[in-house]
Amino acid sequence: MVLWKDFVRGLWAENPTFRLNIGLCPVLAVTTSAINGLSMGAATVFVLICSTALISLIKGIIPDKVRIPAYIIVISTFTTIVDLVMHAYLPDLHSVLGIFIPLIVVNCIVLGRAEAFAAKNSVIRSAFDGLGMGLGFTWALTLLGSIRELLGSGTLFGLALIPEGATTLGIMSLPPGAFITLGILMAVMNMVSARQKKMAS
Amino acid sequence: MNLFTILLSALLVNNFVLVRFLGICPFMGVSKDVDSAIGMGLATTFVMVVTAAATWLIQWFILEPAGLPFLQTLAFILVIASMVQLVEMFLHKTSPSLYRAMGIFLPLITTNCAILGFAIMGVQNSYSFIETVIFGLGAGLGFTLALMLMASIREDLRFADIPKPLRGVGIAFILAGLLSLAFGGFAGLV
Amino acid sequence: MSESLRMVVVLAIIGMVSAGILSVVYDTTSVIIEENAARALESSVYEVLPGTVTVEIIRSSGNQLRVDDPKEMREEEQRTTLIYQGLDGQGNVLGYAFVGEANGYGGVIRILVGVDEATDQILNAKVLAHSETPGLGDRIEGENFRSRFVGKMVTDPIAIGQDIDGLSGATVSSRAAADAVRQGFIDTIAVYRGGE
């Protein structure tokens, strides 16, 4: 079924973070802990699904020359909705994710999928594509967040997993740690996918 | 906070790419050779400075007085998109070769999170007009600096024997990590 | 309809619908956001003025909306130190608290400082907001640094290098925090004690 394919694509084969290498700013910035990564992913999924679905719905009436500004208006509307709702109902999370919530509007994944997929496909397919891409982004964020949290503070989702007083790799919570961990993860993902290809042939 | 501190802070100490994690996509995408890195960096800096002025005016003369702070994201990103469009048209007329060389990356400046990022930060810190412009200048130059450093190293990496999985983005990120570590040394500069 | 006109109309419609939706969402959420902020501030006041049961607002941010000069309005807001009063269960004034602000490394540092009513000495300080570097500047949040302000009076220098030790590796953050406390204290005494 084509909808399933649309959904699964974003999870692995065309994973936005590890395969397409887009939308990387939040991947580094908000992954200081697993829950932060997960929340950012969830917020982005919301914006992705709503935006791609709506854009696909109104694609017929948007003149081609102004499609980018039109997409931007739609995406920033949903982004602002997420921003306001999180600020009201999840203030702690909102303050941790900070400026990266409004920055969802310039996350290349959202605009990229709108332009590449939603502009040419049906609403339901666009929604599934958005969901798949969003979840692919989310698990990448959560994975990186978990690694950095575990090595940097010894906790996972806030639960302490290492004995009291054991040393942690503080650098993991700082920018250099983020870059290096992501680089290594990229390499690992490359190895996994190379092995997959080998086994398939 | 005086202007010099703002400039130096945005340029080095709190470098937008290596410390604040903004502008990563073009940082990875356009840092393969020094020439395009410089071109991208300067174009982005120009857009940032112009955006600084425009967003400051919009925030304090339109959004705030009208009680519409929630339209900030929308207004700012539309301003940025327009500025990039203007820069594109300008380059197309004045320097068609540069315009062609930059190709797809020119419109992509719109999605550079460093631009929207610094504009929002400027408002949050209640910077004055001139402070916002200097902040934008520092952010853009810092972005250009990071891009140039990255590009010059990656140019040399082309001749290095890198393990297959690490090639491309993998080694680039580890490189960025080392650069970020080095930039950490600027803490305490100002 | 000509192409240009159509472009403008479509964008305008999308823009207006979007602004309308956001307006509605904003109206609902801004109420909750303000309530949250007020509650958070109140609980912070309980922390810096132990024993407080009720919080009274002595001075809130400038109410004069200088719409004709937004820059002036913003600067006015910046200059105004928020002041609160803490009352115990019997309505006695325990002390007052103010929000000091100063620019640190990454942005504005806001510190809530609780002062004893009887002695005009600082009881406690709490960092409300900052954008300082994690691991370095954010140590101003810690008990170690905050305790350095306890006991200070407005007549004390409250300056790094004089009566307060800065945090190693976080000079700018420490200095900004001290500036916030000192300046806020001076402003507050002028308003709170000046009228008497």
Image (cartoon, rainbow, N blue to C red):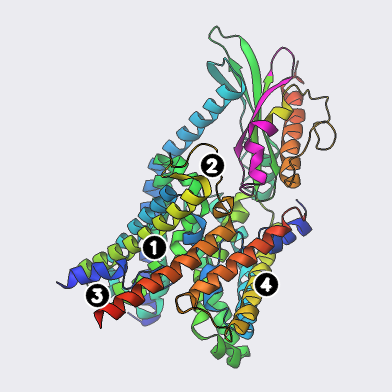
Q: Which residues are magenta?
A: C116-145
Q: Does the image show residue A109?
A: yes
Q: Is residue C180 above or below residue A5?
A: above
Q: Amino acid at mark 4?
A: Leu
**Residue B168 lies in the magenta stretch:** no
Secondary structure beneath disc 1?
helix
Residue A6 location (% of width, % of height)? 24, 71
Report the disc number at residue A75: 1
Q: Quadrant of the N terminus of chain C?
A: bottom left
Per the image, the residue denoted by label 2 is A166
Report the disc number at residue B145: 4
| Mark 4 or mark 1, whichever is nearer to me | 4
Q: Residues within 10 Å of mark 4 (few under 14, many from 20)?
A: many
Q: Is residue A160 above or below residue A174?
A: above
| Mark 3 or mark 2, whichever is nearer to me | 2
Q: Residue at x 40, y 57 (%)?
A: A143
Q: Amino acid at mark 3?
A: Asn
Secondary structure beneath disc 2?
loop
